[in-house]
Amino acid sequence: MLPEIRQKEFGKPDEKQVYDLIIIGNGVAGLAGAMYAARLGMETLVIGEFIGGTLTLTDTVENYPGFKHITGIELTDKIADHARQYDVDMELDDVTSVEKSDCCFIVKTPAKAFKSETLLFATGARHRELVVPNIENFKNKGVHYCALCDGFFYKGKTVGVVGGGDSALKEAIHLAEFAKKVYMFVKGDKLRGENINLERIMGDKTFQIVYGTSLQKVDGTARLESVTLDKEVNGSKTVKLDGMFVAIGYVPNSELAKKLGARLNEKGEIVIDRYGGTSLDGVYAAGDVSDSQFKQAITGVGEAVNAVYDAFTYLNEHEFVCTCIDPTYIHMKSGIHLTEEMKKVQEK
C-alpha cells in the first residue's frame, strides 16, 4: 500500500534567499516545472498572479493523458495539488521587472524583490484582441474573449464567434450549449482544428459558418446589437447579435524576457533550443510563451520539465560568486543537488 500523501501549502518566499530557480508564471507549465525542480533538490520559487493560468478558462480538456474528460479548472487544481506536496515557494503577484545583477537575477514584484541563479519563463500568452472601430465601447457589454466565463448569459440568444482555429471551434461548441444560434465568422476559406471538434460543428443547424469574411464594425447602444461584415449574410452585411466572442489567437507574454535581452522571433515568442534554453545563459522558457510548435497543456508541461533538468545541470557545472546579498557570498553548486533520483537518471 502506498503511503498517505501529506497535505501542505506552498511555502512563503524569502527575499533574503538566493533561489536556485525562479519560475515566472504559475500555469500548468510553471507548476510542473516547480514540482520537478523540487524533486531535484532545487530551491524553487514560483511567481504569478493566479494559480492555473489560462487553462482555467478552458471548458473541457480531452487530450491530456489520463483524463478522458476534465475541465480546465479541475486539471489545474490536480496539478497544483501535486506541486504542493513538494518544497516549493509561491508568490501570488505580478512580476514588474527582471534584471541581471552580477551572478544572479533579480525578479521584482510591486512590493518585493527576489533573487535566483536561473530563470524559467512560463508566462504563457493572452488573447489577441480584435481591432475594429468602436469595439472598446462594448467590451464585456456584448463583446467577450471567454465563452466559459460569459457564455451562460446568452441562453436562448444569438451569438457570433470570430475566428476559424481550434480555439474558435471550442468556443462555438461551448456556446451552443446555451445559445439558440451560433455564427462563426471565418477569415479564411476553411476551419482549422481537431477532427473531433470539426465533426461536432459540421451538420449541426445551430451553427452558421461564414467563410472569407472580416468584421468592419460593431454597433449598439448600451450593449452590442449588431456587427457589419465585408460580405452579405442572408442578404445583408449587417448581422444582428446579442453577443460576440473573439478567438483569433494569442499574443505571447514575452515582454519581461525581451527587456532582459532574450531573443524573440517575429511572433514575439521566446526562441528556445531543444533543452528549453534561451539566448541568455541560465534563462529558460516553456509553454505558450516559447517558439515551440505545439501550444498544448501537455507539451508545455514537457517543455518545462525539460528546461528544469537542463537548469539543474547548468547549476551543477558552474560556480557562482554572488554579490547580490554579500560580496563574500559563495554558492558552490557542483554536486550538492545530486539527489538519488538524479543519480539514477545520469546512470542510464
Image (cartoon, rainbow, N blue to C red):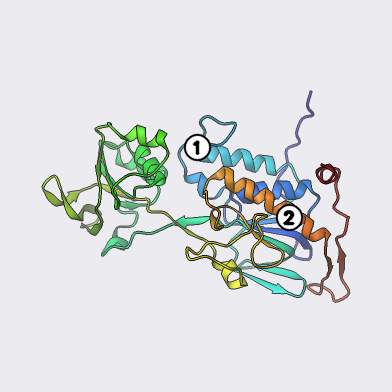
Residue 258 appears at what percent x and percent y? Answer: 57, 70
Give the residue drawn at x 65%, y 48%: 31
**Does 187 appear above or below 73?**
below
Q: Nearer the viewer, residue 332 or 325?
A: 332
Residue 16 appears at what percent x and percent y? Answer: 78, 66
- Which residue is labeled 2 in the image? 310
Give the residue drawn at x 17%, y 53%: 231
Instruction: Name the side, left or right, on which 213 lies relative to 170.
Output: left
Asked whether residue 14 appears in the rendered view, the answer is: yes
Give the residue drawn at x 85%, y 45%: 343
Instruction: Name the side, left or right, on which 45 lies relative to 48.
Output: right
Circle 1 residues within 10 Å: few <14, some 14–19, many ≥20? some
Give the residue drawn at x 64%, y 58%: 273
- Which residue is labeled 1 in the image? 61
**Does 121 appear above or below 348?**
below
Residue 334: name its quadrant: bottom right
SS assignment at label 1: loop
The residue type indicated by label 2 comes to: Asp
